[in-house]
Amino acid sequence: MAIQFFINIFFGFLWMFLSSEFNHEYFAVGFFWGLIILVIFRKVLPGKHLYFIVLWRWLKIIWLFLIELIKADIAVFQLMFKAKLDVNPVIFEYPLSVKKDWQIVMLANMITLTPGTISANISHDNSKIFIHRLDTDDIPGEIDAIKTSFEKWLLEVDK
């Protein structure tokens, strides 16, 4: 993926030097033509996908995570200011669909960074994460929420 990006940068500079105009507009034109060349020759380039597709997927996962983070922040904020603190803390097993180490670490970190949840431990065979949830009555719903959001997004990035 990185080699594709550097090839594209190279085409941007090449266009700039060949046109003898050293400014960002000519670089952008060369960068655009580099993208077109990368699309045409994508079968012979290293990597499964073009770098801008993977980059788009990463930007999407960051955006979606930030939305989930804000929603969780609001939920914990509301919980903090209730007159009577009525919470139901739970530790549950989360079965993993992701298999690669980096995906497991990313998922555990995304769960931990979301307020109200902590990834307490990962099983030795990397098949489960043990999650502490501050307030829930619906463990299957929590599992489904993680499967359809964080884990689905991580699988999409790597497909």
Image (cartoon, grey):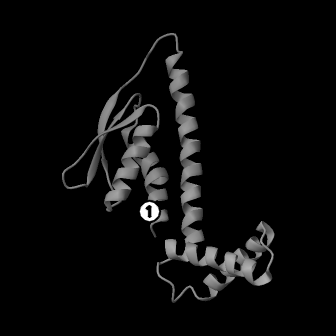
Pick the front one: 13 or 66: 13
- Say left or right for 152 vs 36: left
Residue 97 visible to an observer of this rendering:
no
Residue at left 56%, top 85%? Answer: 42
Q: Secondary structure at mark 1?
A: helix
Quadrant in the rendering for residue 133: top left
How many marks on residues? 1
- Say left or right for 127 vs 56: left
Residue at left 49%, top 63%? Answer: 157
Pick the front one: 98 or 39: 39
Pick the front one: 55 or 127: 55
The outermost residue toward the top is 83
Residue 20 visible to an observer of this rendering:
yes
Quadrant in the rendering for residue 100: bottom left
- Say left or right for 37 vs 109: right
Residue at left 50%, top 18%? Answer: 80
Q: Which residue is mark 1?
A: 155
Task: Give the class, few, some or many, for how many residues have Cα within 10 Å of label 1's Cα (few <14, many ≥20).
Answer: some
Residue at left 53%, top 29%? Answer: 75
Q: Residue 122: where, in percent of width, then height?
A: 26, 46
Q: Residue 29: where, in percent of width, then height?
A: 77, 75
Label 1 sits on what residue type? Leu
**Vertical side of 143 occupied by 49: above or below:** below
